[in-house]
Image (cartoon, helix red, strand yellow):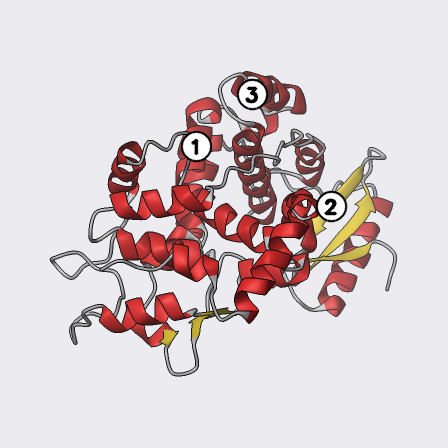
Amino acid sequence: MAKGIYKRGMIWWIRYTGCDGKKRFESSKSTSFKIAENLLIHRKNEVMEGRNPDKRIKNHTFQELANHYSSWAARQKSFKSKKGFIRQLVMVFGNCQLRNITPMFIEQWQTERFTMNKPATVNRLLATLKHMFTKAMEWDMLSEDILQKVRRVKLLREDNKRLRFLAVEECQRLIDCCAPHLKPIVMVALHTGMRQGEILNLKWEHVDLKHGFILLDTTKTGERREIPIDNTLKEMFNEMPRGFESKCVFTGKDGDTYKSVKRSFNTALKKAEISNFRFHDLRHTFASHLVMIGVDLVTVKELLGHKSLTMTLRYAHLSPGHKVKAVEMLDNTLSGMSSIQKVYNFEK
C-alpha cells in the first residue's frame, strides 16, 4: 500500500505534510484506491509549488452536528438508546464550536457527570460524543487533528461486579405476586435468561414448541440465538391464548405489545418484599442458578448470548461453593424429580 494512503471504513484517506510542516488528513470520498492515490499526488504537487491545498472548514457548532447526527442515527437500530444521550450532550456542548471542544473541556464535564452518574452511564455518553466527532470529520465539519484529540479522552473504569439474584424461594414468591399479564413474562425471564426487550418483542413465529426452541434472529449482540424451552415453559405457552390478529406473544387488552412492565414489576417486588432488584437481575438469577447447579460457564455464555466469556466470568465465583448442591441436583434429576422445575412450576 502506498505511503500516505489509508482506509477508514470503506473510504480511502490521504495523509501528507502541508506548507507549514503540519500533517494534513483528507478524505478522497471514494472507495477507489486509485482516486485516493491521484489525489495524494495532486496535493503533494501543490505543496511543492508552494500552494496550501488545505480547504477551510467552517465553524460548526455542536448543535449543528447534533442535528445532522440525529438525522443519520434515526436510520440506525441503536438510535432509540442514543436519542437520550444526544439530547444530554446538546445541553452541555450545544452552543460550542466543535473546534473549541477540547479534551480538557470534555474531561471537566466527565468529572462533573461522575459525581451524579455511574461510570457506565458516563462512558456511554462519552462513546456517543466520540462517535459524533468521527461522523463530523467524515462530513467535513472538523479536521482530523481535532478528532484525534477528542479520541484521546479515556473512558472511566467501570465496576461491573454488581450481581443481584434471587434465591429459589424468592423466585416463587415473586411469581406469586405478579399480576396475570406479568407472570408469564417473568417466567420466561427466569427460565431463559432473555433480556426484557427480547421478551416483550417476542413473536409466536419465534416460538418453536415442536422442537423446543425460541429462535431469536436479532439480539443485542446482532447474532442469532437459539434458546431451549423447558417443560414448564412449554406447558405455559400451550395454555396461553393466541389470537390470530396478534403476532406477538405478550400483548395488552388492545392487542399492542408492552413498551415496559416497570410499574407492574415494581408492584410485584413490593408485594413480595424484594428490594434492590431490577428486571435485568432476572437474567442474573437464571445464570447464577445454572452455575450453582454445576453448568459450565461456556454453556451459560451460549445460553445468555454473550459475545465473549469475559461477561460470563462474573458468575464463576458461585461454582465452587455449590458443588454439593450440584451433586444433589444430579441425584434429583436421575431420580426423575427436577427440583428446579418443581420450584418454578407455573401456577395457572
Residue holding disc 3: 114
- Badges 3 and 2: C-beta atoms under 8 Å apart? no
**Mark nearer the N terminus (3 vs 2):** 2
Residue holding disc 1: 63
Q: What secondary structure is marked by label 1?
A: helix
**Mark nearer the N terminus (1 vs 3):** 1
Q: What secondary structure is marked by label 2?
A: strand
Q: Is residue 225 above or below residue 164?
A: below
Q: Residue at x 42, y 49 (%)?
A: 79
Q: Position of residue 22 (x, y in %)?
A: 82, 35
Residue holding disc 2: 25
Q: Position of residue 170 (x, y in %)?
A: 40, 41
Whether residue 303 appears in this view of the structure is yes
User: Which amino acid type is shown beneath numbered disc 2?
Assistant: Phe
Q: Is residue 86 above or below residue 16?
A: above
User: Which amino acid type is shown beneath numbered disc 1?
Assistant: Gln
Q: Position of residue 13 (x, y in %)?
A: 72, 55
Q: CA distance from mark 2 to mark 1?
A: 24 Å
Residue 83 appears in which quarter of the rendering?
A: top left
**Mark nearer the N terminus (2 vs 1):** 2
